[in-house]
């Protein structure tokens, strides 16, 4: 008895779907990323810390590859602050160093050349977000407070607000 072609195709598809997929641990790289809600919590806390000090700022959170997840701008923050906050966060993940440290290094020696890297902004206010096991999972950048040290303080307040979620 001949089976209809559609039944054979269906049975073949089911058999292929049930077959174990070849898995090769050397093929794919996996990594952790902050959920959007956690990034938003950090950004809101950084913004609140700056507001408490009377600063109107922008805050950006990027993932470990430098892709923006969240950007917030307070009502009276300068027009440039959103892009500046994003670039600070991007710089922190790209160079795997907080931007306040990069600012000092960019003043002397060969490190001054990092100022010529597209999007790099070695000014204080970009802080890496590091999980409890030391894995960098992103960065937060703040712009608009009076100076990089104040921006960094607000960024660190944002990270402190999610510390219980990222430390394990």
Image: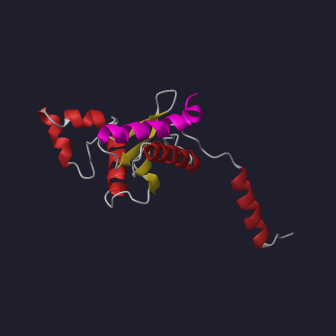
Which quadrant of the structure image shows residue 100?
top left
Residue found at x 43% / y 60%: 75
Q: Position of residue 45 (x, y in %)?
A: 51, 43
Tag count in the figure? 0
Q: Position of residue 68 (x, y in %)?
A: 43, 53
As rendered, which of 12 and 162 lies closer to the eye? Answer: 162
The magenta span reads 148-168
Q: Residue furthest left?
A: 109
Residue shown at 34%/50% (left/top)? 144
Where in the figure is residue 19, as x and y percent of width and height?
A: 69, 49
In the image, 22: left or right of 117? right
Quarter of the image containing the N terminus?
A: bottom right
Relative to 104, does residue 122 appear above or below in the rendering?
A: below
Q: Is residue 60 magenta?
A: no
Q: Nearer the viewer, residue 20 or 78?
A: 78
- Where residue 91 sits, quadrant-wise, is top left
Q: Main secondary structure of the magenta part?
A: helix
Query: Depth check: 64 or 18 in front?
Result: 64
Q: Residue at x 60, y 44 (%)?
A: 22
Residue 161 shown left or right of residue 54 in the figure:
right
As drawn, the residue found furthest toward the right would be 1
């Amino acid at each position: 008895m001949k089976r209809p072609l559609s039944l054979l195709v269906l049975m073949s598809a089911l058999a292929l779907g049930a077959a174990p997929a070849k898995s090769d641990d050397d093929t794919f790289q996996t990594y952790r990323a902050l959920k959007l809600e956690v990034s938003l919590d950090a950004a809101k806390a950084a913004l609140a810390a700056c507001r408490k000090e009377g600063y109107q700022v922008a805050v950006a959170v990027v993932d470990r590859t430098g892709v923006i997840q969240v950007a917030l701008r307070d009502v009276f923050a300068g027009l440039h602050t959103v892009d500046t906050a994003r670039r600070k966060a991007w710089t922190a993940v790209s160079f795997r160093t907080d931007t306040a440290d990069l600012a000092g290094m960019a003043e002397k020696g060969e490190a001054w050349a990092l100022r010529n890297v597209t999007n790099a902004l070695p000014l204080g206010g970009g802080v890496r977000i590091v999980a409890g096991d030391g894995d960098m999972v992103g960065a937060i950048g703040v712009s608009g407070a009076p100076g990089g040290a104040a921006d960094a303080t607000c960024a660190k307040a944002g990270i402190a607000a999610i510390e219980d979620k990222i430390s394990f």
